[in-house]
């Protein structure tokens, strides 16, 4: 099926996107980012990546469908701000892609689908999925064909510049021959995982290939970009249509709020409280509280007493305990003292 209502073709100017990240970009965190960012940013958000195998299994579907959850408050904010939300999926079986994507389009209200062909994690690669597909053109093509045939939504791929070595020209040229609306290119090979530096010259090479082969396909760059200023420099130098931000959000959750403001104790504590509240409303006790602990360092840094505050928060295991520690700190008590 051809894409209908294709926002990829309608969005103009530099696009800023927040990458799909496991146990990070759930409905609560996505809403938090929208609430503390410049209205309308980021332009595009992604779900956590979801297994098509799981979605095609009666028991597995129940176990993985939480990754596609969109709370009512997030949906309202998305619609109000005009921000797009894309479901990212992974797997290696074209038939399961077909079934899973039909299910997603029928049961949810996502703006598009993205296929993960870049995840470097060993168990995903061993499954023949994620970045393993970089060395399997035929399989990748069959997956894209099955997905496109099953969908009316726009379709994109997130990938890397190679598997064991840099293979940008072959691999990206192949993807550009496929019926895709956008491609996000991460500037590392699978073997690097997240180590070393992203090779933006290779991303620039991908842009050149896009310009020559399929100028209508959006080409997004990804890797080691930690501010909007840096993003704009990369766009100007390498010619991408936008930037996908990943780990930079952990260093600065206000990444999409570019104005020169002082993010102090008050703002950080308010963001922490907001995240806890959104997580509780979205999940209740349905998702393990310790997942939140990876976020505490984001908020509890760069102010006097942050280390002891953070240390105390790492010991909490419930929303009530967390609120007690936050309230203690706000009253001038140093947690853990």
Image (cartoon, grey):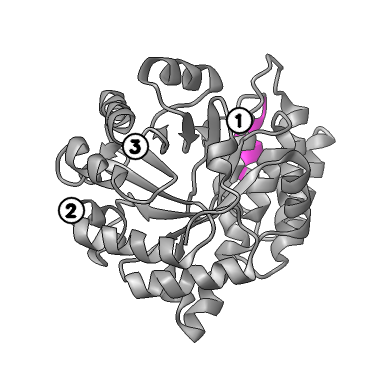
- Residue 242 relative to residue 199: left or right: right
Q: Identify which residue, 243 or 336, lies in the foreground.
A: 243
Q: Label 3 neighbourhood size at 10 Å, few (<14), some (14-19), many (20+)? A: some
Q: If you read the primary sequence from the N terminus, does the residue marked by circle 3 or circle 2 appear first? A: 2
Task: Name the residue beneath numbered marker 2.
Answer: 135
Q: Identify which residue, 278 or 111, lies in the foreground.
A: 111
> Which span of residues is magenta-colored?
304-311
Residue 128, position as x, y percentages in the image? 24, 64
Residue 190, position as x, y percentages in the image? 24, 46
Residue 7, position as x, y percentages in the image? 58, 43
Q: Secondary structure at mark 3?
A: loop
Kindly indicate whether the residue at mark 2 contacts the one at mark 1 (C-beta within 8 angstroms): no
Q: If you read the primary sequence from the N terminus, does the residue marked by circle 3 or circle 1 appear first? A: 3
Task: Name the residue beneath numbered marker 1.
Answer: 301
Residue 210, position as x, y percentages in the image? 32, 33
Q: How many marks?
A: 3
Gap between marks 3 and 2 measured at Cα: 21 Å
- Residue 171 relative to residue 321: left or right: left
Gap between marks 1 and 2 measured at Cα: 42 Å
Which residue is pictured at 45% across the width and 82% down the height?
Answer: 57
Which residue is pictured at 67% across the width and 52% down the height?
Answer: 28
Magenta portion: prevailing SS class = helix
Task: Name the residue beneath numbered marker 3.
Answer: 214
Q: Is residue 332 visible?
A: yes
Q: Secondary structure at mark 1?
A: loop
């Amino acid at each position: 099926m051809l894409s209908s209502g294709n926002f990829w073709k309608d969005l103009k100017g530099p696009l800023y996107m927040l990458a799909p990240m496991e146990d990070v970009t759930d409905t609560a965190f996505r809403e938090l980012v929208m609430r503390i960012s410049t209205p309308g940013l980021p332009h595009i958000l992604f779900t956590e990546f979801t297994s098509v195998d799981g979605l095609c299994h009666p028991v597995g579907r129940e176990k993985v469908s939480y990754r596609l959850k969109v709370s009512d408050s997030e949906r309202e904010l998305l619609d109000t701000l005009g921000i797009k939300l894309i479901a990212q999926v992974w797997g290696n079986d074209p038939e399961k892609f077909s079934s899973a994507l039909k299910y997603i389009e029928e049961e949810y209200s996502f703006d598009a689908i993205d296929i993960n062909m870049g995840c470097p994690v060993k168990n995903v690669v061993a499954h023949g999925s994620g970045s393993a597909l970089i060395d399997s053109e035929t399989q990748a093509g069959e997956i894209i064909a099955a997905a496109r045939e099953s969908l009316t939504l726009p379709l994109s791929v997130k990938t890397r510049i190679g598997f064991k070595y840099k293979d940008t020209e072959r691999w990206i040229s192949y993807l550009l021959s496929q019926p895709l609306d956008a491609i996000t290119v991460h500037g590392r090979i699978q073997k690097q995982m997240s180590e070393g530096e992203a090779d933006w010259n290779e991303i620039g090479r991908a842009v050149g290939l896009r310009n020559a082969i399929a100028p209508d396909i959006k080409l997004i760059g990804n890797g080691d970009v930690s501010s909007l200023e840096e993003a704009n420099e990369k766009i100007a130098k390498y010619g991408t249509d936008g930037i996908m931000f990943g780990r930079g959000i952990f260093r600065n959750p206000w990444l999409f709020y570019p104005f020169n403001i002082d993010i102090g104790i008050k703002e950080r504590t308010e963001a922490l409280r907001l995240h806890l509240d959104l997580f509780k409303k979205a999940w209740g006790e349905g998702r393990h509280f310790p997942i939140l602990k990876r976020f505490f360092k984001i908020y509890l840094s760069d102010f006097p007493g942050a280390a002891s505050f953070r240390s105390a928060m790492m010991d909490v295991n419930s929303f009530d305990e967390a609120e007690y520690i936050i309230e203690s700190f706000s009253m001038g008590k140093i947690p853990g003292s």
